[in-house]
Image (cartoon, coloured by chain):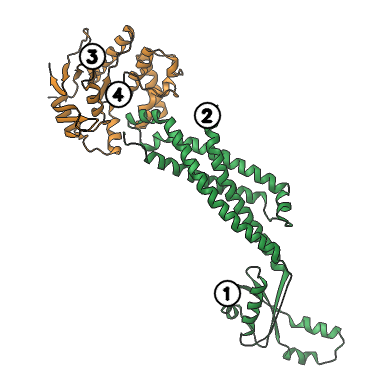
Chain colours: A orange, B green
Amino acid sequence: MAKNVIVAKDLYLEYKKNTPIIKDSTFSIKSGSFVFITGPSGSGKSTLLKSFYGELKPQQGVLQIGGVSLNDIKPSKLAFLRKYLGIIFQDYKLIKEWTVKKNVMLPLLIAGYSKNVCETQTARLLKHVRLSGKENYYPMELSGGEQQRVAMARALAHNPVIILADEPTGNLDEYSSRVIWGLLEGANEQLGTTVVVVTHSIPSNLKVPYKHFYIEDGKVYEIS
Amino acid sequence: MRSLKNHVSLIIPLFAILFAVEFYFVINAIIKDYESRLNRDYSIVVVANKELTLQEIKVHEPDIAQLQELNSTLVIERLKKNGIKVDFNELKNFLPKFYKVYLSSFPSSQKLASLRNKLVEIEGVKRVEAFTKVHEKIYRFLLFLKNISKLFLAIIFITSVMLVFKQIEIWNLEHSERMYIMALFGAPLWMRNAILIKLSVIDTIVSTLLVYLLYSYVVGSGYLTKLLGVESIGFTSSDLFKDALWLFALGLIISVFNVIIVSMRQPKVA
């Protein structure tokens, strides 16, 4: 039986005092599962995701990622934990002064892999996201879809245990969306990576089984 | 263009600090050199009827660096030349001992007077003769310059360190997005700040080089000797090179220390 990789108990998140975004929410996400978090705009989907990668700490309740409590996590421990996460953002968050190749290499460099391994893995991933030949481009020279594919390659580079994606196809054309969903499915199916996606709408043609969480009035409900 | 402006903004305060430090080094070297020259321009002779040791007289005056016994045959030779008819072998037994005293630094006229009084009080010392040339004016001017350069160094140091800090804060702000993204992927603090350290190292190298070249020119052209009114400054290009290494280390410590302080002040997002 698969273990829980994300556990939330009576979770309470807020930016401003006494203005809860998420409240009294208890849920868990199993290792190797594919999860969608949906809800109306401003319901707290992205906030919840931020708490998963430690950018927002819970004010009340318990939140654990891979058995590590994020409530009072120290910066050094958080940095260590993040090495096991792959994060994808709607606005890509690529380093604009770096080439595509270096952006993809980032998690590998942080993990301390040798230059050779970094080069090989980056070339393989760029081929995978169909961006071979654009290694030395800068993000600004790429289309939105291409930039998101670079972000996708970066998120997969270090074989993360969990991929957290915030509206990964929100601004993309159909082709790029297909590539991104294909890669997320592939990582989940073939590598057993847990995938948590925040989105407005779940794609209809998904091949993998998934779980669906819905946020309403600050509470997280498991729908399926 | 913006990047060049950013570099210049750090190079200028770093240059100011390093320039002031080097100025202090140069003044110090000039004073030391001048003191060593002045040391040849005084003479203290002690006449004693017993043998003196350096340890013995150092108890009375710690500044005494060397005690040299003058050969009595020189005195006898002089008497012989003057045609004085005495038994010189007998005289040798009666002659007192003559010593020349060397100090560790050039004495002022007050110091020389007090030294003479101290030496006379030593048991066995019959007479002390001290001769000096007057060099007070220029020596005092150099000491004044040294103190002024200390003050100048302190003021420049404080204001420039503040400017360095501000500039590194600006860089930190400029690169905050990159650092944030790196933090999201678990980059440690040193890796996130690597860009700031890299920029600091480059600017420290440039500042050190500028200071080195400027001083090489000023010292080499003889402009400094003319300006200070001294014969020579006793400062070679190898001294300048050695100083440049110290200046580089100092510049690096200042900028890296500021990078650490700025990064500590970052909000703990990651």
Chain to which mark 2 belongs: B
The residue pinned by badge 1 equals B62
Name which of mark 3 and mark 4 comes first in the sequence.
Answer: 4
Q: Is the same chain shared between marks 3 and 1? A: no
Q: In this view, does B257 lie above or below B144?
A: above
Q: What residue type is labelled 3?
A: His
On screen, B217 above or below A96? Answer: below
The count of marks equals 4
Dot 3: chain letter: A
Residue B262: x %, y % from top left? 41, 40
Cα–Cα gap, marks 3 and 4: 18 Å
Give the secondary structure at mark 3: loop
Mark closer to the observer (4, 2): 2
Q: Are marks 1 and 4 in contact (CB under 8 Å)?
A: no
Labels 1 and 4 within one chain: no
**Residue that carries the numbered disc 4 in the rendered image:** A87
- Residue at image x 73%, y 46%? B221
The answer to which of A133 and A70 lies nearer the viewer is A70
Q: In this view, does B170 lie to the left or right of A216?
A: right
Q: Nearer the viewer, mark 1 or mark 2?
A: 2
Q: Quadrant of residue B95?
A: bottom right
Q: Which chain carries label 1?
A: B
